[in-house]
Image (cartoon, rainbow, N blue to C red):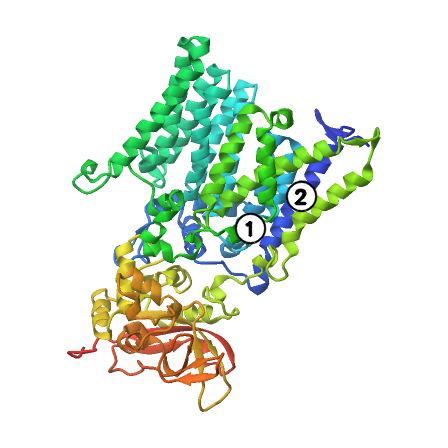
């Protein structure tokens, strides 16, 4: 049966076999993506990571109080005593979209359960958007390949699994949809349809910006593409109104949100679209008044001039003499982490940014783990695009330019942050899909001795299926599917230990056993959990809005008990929470021994010291892991860790030592330092793992009450 054979008709639309193939592949892609993303559900129905808990609470606020109250909300549980202007510092469209869709589709489910499902559903639905987008570039086959590759992309699925109620899934959905509307409008021959797509494309792209700040990186290839349009398109009259309309709508809607807001519109982000649009208009005018033989030359001269002047102004903007009295720059720049994505060498400048695992620079090995053979096929795709003979019948010239720009920018941006590997993945998906489409179409046209060789074609299909499914199942326990077989972080505290209920039990205890107005001091990692599940106020949290406050908390943890107690008292703190990862290594009832380390606060000492601008070597031995005697005996965190050094042990030589030696592991025994009313702090709660007598890993959450009546001694 031919793929063009009509099966039945609905109104004026003829359903053909190819339409059912397309629907079938998209259903397969959606189902595969959703199943892989849903693996964390086997451990428990909880939100994953940290930010989703705040996003849930903000969405809940809209559902319970309405949008007007949301935009007036100053969250007093955050950043005590200042609070947080939520709408000015949050992903407004993430909260708004989730609240609206819950009210439409939520049914009888709880909002908490709905927000757990939301990222997996939105992320899986994006297979349809990527199909439509890539179809513009390389046709239906390329679009279908793209949907299947997107469905199993490890970097994308990691940042959009069940419970991952964060910015990326919705931001990518809106970003790709806005990109599709914009590019399909550019290709459309119906100007009325094109105008509608341009307007909606600009709106949706702005929604993406208000959902995830990372969508700023969609703007870079769009700006470069606009710069290229006068050279590759002849319908200049259409470009003269369509491009300014798209940019105008996008910036107008973006500026109407508090975030990204007017700083984005009049900053580097907005100018990266405004300047290319101005160049396009001026270039078209220059070409119109120039002789045929000088049109391109004059436009190129104008482009080079703009690049030189723009670079010069950016350098001047960074110079001290061009700053205002309050040390702000004339041209607003993106936040440090987004500048860091453009220049990865900036990472080590800011210890706070450097301390976040997802901000680590991607290695070659990690990139290959994320993308596998896609990297090879993307290279083939680039080769095809540069080959006029091969690509001219598959990809139009302007779309070819966009694909190459997007591919290069996406791979570069992805190489700077692990978190931004999603852009590298999207780029490689597009390039690989085009390569697969062109390869498949050409191979299926091949005939040997005037006959169709089905064995050769079947072999090709088998090889392609094998290559692209291999990373899903190999290596065992470290493949793309197994990579998602992880419990929500609330069960592990981001440690390497197996899941437990220690955090959930602790937060429930805090909710029921501390005053409602209690203020909790802890490292910023745990702020959103405390605010959302324990319903208590924190000094710092995962929004990292005030770096100086985070630095102050690091100084408290690394300070002497007296100094730290004074600082906590000045902050009006009531409790201090710490999280430890440990392992019990013996079954001796009289002499219980443990090993610390594995992702708790005991493993973050290096970051506490660096963020507090303290000498790391004062607190850690040469291995960068084991605490020094000073840390153990003279710091508040050292005193709060309810273990004391028993000995140091080398497993290779089976040698014991009373003092630290390189290569030796610290063995500890239980010893609660603060357990009386005469101490600056008093341990009032220890999670179940601390009391567990079983050999094995332990997730330990401890809550200390601050003794407001403590009288510091003259010396520590």
Pinpoint residue 128: horizontal percent, then vertical percent.
60, 39
CB contact under 8 Å: marks 2 and 1 = no
Q: Is residue 578 visible?
A: yes
Q: Which residue is mark 1?
A: 368
> Considering the image in quadrants, where does the N terminus appear?
top right
Q: Nearer the viewer, residue 41 or 149?
A: 149
Which quarter shows the C terminus? bottom left
Q: CA distance from mark 2 to mark 1?
A: 28 Å
**Vertical side of 599 occupied by 216: above or below:** above
681 sits left or right of 27 in the view: left
| Kind of element beneath mark 2 | helix
Query: In the visual, does 378 lie left or right of 342?
Result: right
Residue underneath mark 2: 27
Element marked by disc 1: helix
Considering only vertical position in the picture, is 601 above or below 234?
Answer: below
Quadrant assignment, res 483 = bottom right
Q: Position of residue 176 (x, y in %)?
A: 52, 37
**Where is residue 412 drawn, in percent x and y?**
46, 42
In terms of sequence position, does the residue under pointer 2 or pointer 1 come before the other?
2
Please identify the quarter of the rendering in which residue 661 is found. bottom left
Q: How many marks?
A: 2
Which is in the foreground here, disc 2 or disc 1? 1
Label 2: few (<14), some (14–19) or many (≥20) C-alpha neighbours in 10 Å: some
Question: Looking at the image, which is closer to me, 400 or 11?
Answer: 400
Q: Position of residue 87 (x, y in %)?
A: 35, 45
Query: For the residue carrying disc 1, how many other residues have a C-alpha within 10 Å: few (<14), some (14-19), or many (20+)?
Result: few
Residue 539 visible in this rendered orientation of the protein: no
In the image, residue 228 above or below residue 376 = above
| Residue closest to the eye, 41 or 213 | 213
């Amino acid at each position: 049966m031919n793929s063009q054979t009509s099966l039945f008709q609905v109104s004026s639309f003829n359903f053909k076999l190819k339409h059912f193939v397309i629907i079938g592949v998209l259903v397969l892609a959606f189902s595969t993506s959703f199943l892989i993303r849903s693996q964390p559900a086997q451990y428990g129905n909880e939100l994953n990571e940290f930010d989703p808990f705040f996003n849930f609470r903000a969405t809940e606020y809209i559902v319970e109080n309405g949008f007007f109250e949301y935009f007036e909300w100053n969250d007093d549980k955050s950043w005590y005593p200042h609070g947080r202007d939520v709408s000015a510092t949050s992903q407004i469209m993430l909260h708004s979209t989730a609240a609206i869709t819950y009210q439409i589709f939520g049914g009888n489910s709880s909002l908490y359960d709905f927000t757990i499902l939301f990222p997996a559903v939105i992320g899986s639905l994006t297979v349809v958007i990527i199909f439509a987008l890539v179809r513009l570039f390389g046709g239906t086959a390329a679009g279908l390949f793209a949907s299947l590759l997107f469905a199993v992309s490890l970097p994308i699925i990691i940042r959009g699994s069940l419970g991952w109620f964060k910015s990326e899934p919705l931001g990518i959905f809106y970003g790709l949809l806005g990109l599709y509307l914009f590019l399909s409008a550019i290709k459309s021959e119906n100007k009325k349809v094109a105008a509608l797509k341009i307007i909606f494309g600009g709106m949706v792209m702005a929604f993406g910006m208000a959902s995830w700040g990372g969508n700023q990186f969609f703007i870079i290839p769009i700006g470069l593409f606009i710069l290229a349009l006068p050279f590759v398109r002849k319908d200049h009259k259409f470009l003269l109104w369509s491009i300014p309309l798209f940019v105008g709508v996008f910036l107008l809607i973006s500026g109407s949100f508090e975030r990204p807001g007017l700083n984005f519109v009049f900053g580097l982000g907005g100018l990266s679209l405004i300047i290319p649009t101005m160049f396009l208009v001026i270039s078209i005018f220059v070409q119109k008044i120039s002789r045929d033989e000088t049109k391109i030359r004059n436009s190129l001269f104008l482009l080079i001039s703009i690049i030189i002047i723009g670079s010069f102004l950016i350098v001047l903007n960074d110079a001290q003499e061009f700053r205002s009295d309050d040390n702000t720059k004339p041209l607003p720049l993106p936040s440090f982490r987004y500048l860091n994505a453009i220049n990865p060498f900036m990472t080590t400048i800011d210890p706070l940014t450097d301390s976040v695992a997802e901000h680590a620079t991607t290695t070659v090995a990690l990139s290959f783990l994320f993308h596998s053979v896609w990297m090879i096929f993307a290279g083939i795709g680039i080769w095809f695009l540069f080959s006029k003979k091969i690509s001219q019948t598959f990809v139009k010239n302007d779309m070819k330019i966009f694909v190459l720009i997007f591919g290069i920018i996406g791979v570069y941006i992805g190489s700077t942050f692990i978190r931004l590997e999603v852009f590298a993945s999207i780029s490689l998906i597009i390039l690989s899909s085009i390569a697969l489409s062109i390869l498949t179409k050409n191979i299926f046209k091949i005939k040997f001795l005037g006959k169709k060789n089905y064995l050769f074609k079947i072999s090709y299909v088998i090889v392609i299926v094998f290559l692209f499914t291999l990373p899903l199942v190999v290596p065992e326990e470290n493949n793309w599917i197994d990579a998602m077989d992880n419990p929500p972080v609330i069960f592990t505290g981001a440690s390497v230990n197996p899941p437990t209920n220690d955090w959930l039990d602790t937060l429930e205890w805090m909710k029921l056993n501390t005053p409602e107005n209690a203020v909790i001091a802890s490292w910023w990692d745990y702020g959103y959990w405390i605010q959302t599940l324990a319903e208590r106020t924190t000094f710092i949290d995962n929004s990292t809005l005030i770096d100086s406050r985070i630095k102050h908390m690091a100084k408290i943890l690394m300070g002497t008990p007296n100094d730290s107690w004074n600082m906590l008292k000045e902050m009006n703190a009531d409790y201090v929470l710490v999280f430890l990862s440990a392992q019990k290594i013996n079954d001796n009832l009289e002499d219980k021994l443990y090993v610390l380390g594995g992702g708790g606060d005991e493993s973050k000492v290096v970051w506490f010291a660096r963020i507090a601008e303290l000498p790391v070597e004062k607190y850690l031995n040469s291995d960068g892991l084991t605490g020094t005697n000073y840390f153990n005996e003279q710091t508040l965190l050292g005193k709060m860790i309810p273990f004391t050094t028993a000995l140091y042990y080398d497993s290779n030589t089976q040698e014991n030592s009373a003092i630290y030696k390189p290569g030796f592991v610290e063995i500890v025994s239980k010893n609660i330092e603060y357990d009386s009313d005469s101490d600056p702090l008093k341990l009032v709660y220890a999670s179940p793992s601390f009391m567990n007598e079983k050999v094995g890993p332990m997730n330990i959450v401890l809550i200390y009450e601050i003794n407001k009546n403590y009288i510091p001694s003259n010396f520590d």
